[in-house]
Amino acid sequence: MHWLKILTPLLAASLWTTAVSTAMAQNRGDQVLLDMQQAFRKNDKARLTQLLPSAQGHVLEPWAAYWELKARLDDASADEIQAFFKRWAGSYQEDRLRNDWLLLLGQRRDWGLFDQVHAAFRMRDDRSVNCYALLVDSIKGQASPGTGQKVRDLWWAQRDADDGCTLAAGEMYAARQITAAEVWRKARQAAEANRQKATRDAVTIVAPEVVSQVAQVFSAPAKYLAGQARVRGAVPKELALLALIRVASTDPDAAAAQLEGGWGARLSAEENNWAWAVIGKQAALKLQPEANSYFAKVRKDSDLSDELLGWKVRAALRAGDWRAVRRSIDAMGAERTEPTWIYWKARALLAGRPSEQERGEARQLLEDIAGTSSFYAQLALEEIGQRVTVPPAPAPLTAQEKAGARANPALARGLYAIQAGLRSEGVREWNYATNLHQPGGMGDRELLAAADYACQQQVWDRCINTSERTRGFADWSQRFPMPFHDTVLARARSIGLDPAYVYGLIRQESRFIMDARSGVGASGLMQVMPATARWTARKIGMADFSPSMINDRDVNITIGTAYLKLALDDFDGSMALAAAGYNAGPGRPRSWRNGPVLDAAIWAENVPFSETRDYVKKVLSNTTNYAALITGQPQSLKSRLGTVGPRDASTPDPSKELP
């Protein structure tokens, strides 16, 4: 027998054995990392230390080393931490641990070491760390004239209380770089958000002698107001305003009665303006017709925050008060440059009988934001007479560009982590590697190549999110992928559902992550809740359905599309209402549609839940772009929006049976 005939099967067997052994070893290594992740989440320091040696040499070893050291960071020596920085220099894990250590050093008030560690910090997206850094500059005598304003803005942007910005704000107030009015504004915003600790922290800075009263302001605001028969001085009036804010949060009409019943005369003009705006916002969140009239009692829009002005605009849109829309947007600060408010400013300019100057200004505003990238960009595009079309594809990636992305260790680690079951860690590492704000951050072609790498691995969320960040061009094959194309189109068309609408919804729901699971238990591509899945399965006659089937791709698409079609039919074909119902449950849009008949864009902008408001706009925008891809024809977002109003009383209301 020829020696090749003997050797070939032996060689094949050897290669197979080696491949199997390597795969088994890698699988064991993956399990070690998964076990360490669980130990980290449980703060099991002993288990982490025990498992760490088994992760040595694994592609995700930086995560293992990070978890083990982070769990005992309070007791770790500076030398040990510096050794970690050196061992994993340039990685996400190095910068993540540096962020963690900076927070600890700030809490310890170790400003000298903080300054040394901060010098090599790259991430710089943690507001608390940034506040500590600004405070250190002030301590060193290197504060710039705008340091107080920077601290104030970071502090205002934080919803919850934290040590870094609260400490820095207190120091800036003591140094007269932040005013008492700015501190009280933080207290007002925190009170409105029902953040008692953040409110108390702000009051402690500006009026420590009355901080004990904050608890009653929150627990029994009406009772607190009733006990303030004589109010003199700025501090008692500010506390009364906090109580009015708390009353308004549950009963805006009761807060209005308090103002009109005497409290308005006791407060300053600025405090009255703020109080009426908060009352207007809370009424707007309840879609009360009185919202616009409450806002009309504000005498000076410049006294309000951009967030309150945004709700003033929404209430005015719902009431058809275009003059108030225009005036309120003009009073905004930085928010005025957002596409949302640019679009509505243009629409306000065109309302009624606009002058040639107003037409010209509106046209320029619309042209500035027109495009295909977002809801308001698409609406602006239509306002200037164009439709959504697929943009030209960028030049194809070269082999060298593709190889560069695949040779990036952070990208490879990110994808490996996601595919091994460590999605949160993988996403963070991937985002860090592609972040344009990091030193040596990626340009458009590098982002395109990174997105292609993720697409080829079918990690669709990183594919989409990375591609969305290119500025000079837009590759729609990456931004709007169509996995499971034949299944989705066949299923959608078989039940009379627009496949573009299905893709638009899936893209927003799960980014095509097969095993996606929400915090409330929704599962799969179309994020179907278990109860909804069971109800829909019965409705469509799927007799063999069991909850364990919901993560099966085809079952999830079948159930999700069936429920979406039922919702669409029950909401009279309104894509906006059906999308809102899919996200927030059908009961809420049933009440949200009551009131005047509105342009659906105005209706969507007034949806009380910020998540659902954003969701509806993104699903409809996605749908329009997918329709352009699927049909190859120019598309209209406006035609998909239509109007929203109360159900015709003569029409049966089958929506009540939707779960």
Image: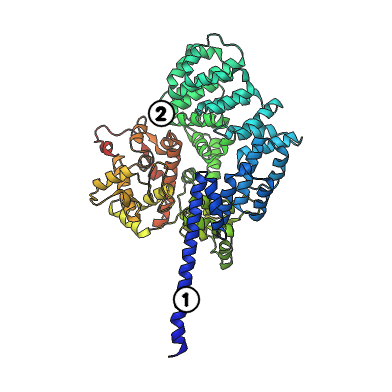
Examine the image and state in which quarter residue 400 appears.
bottom right
Q: Amino acid at mark 1?
A: Ser
The disc label shown at residue 30, or none: none
The disc label shown at residue 287, or none: 2
Which structural element holds mark 2? loop
Q: Nearer the viewer, mark 1 or mark 2?
A: 1
Let me know if residue 521 appears in the view. yes
Left or right, 630 with reference to 169: left
The disc label shown at residue 14, or none: 1
Which structural element holds mark 1? helix
Examine the image and state in which quarter residue 300 appears.
top right
Where's residue 475, x and y in %?
Answer: 50, 57
Decide which of 475, 324 is in the foreground and name it: 475
Say which residue appears at 57% left-offset and 16% top-offset. 237
**Which class describes the residues within 10 Å of circle 2: few (<14), some (14-19), or many (20+)?**
many
Q: Tell me the distance, in whole angstroms, between the alpha carbons under discs 1 and 2.
A: 72 Å
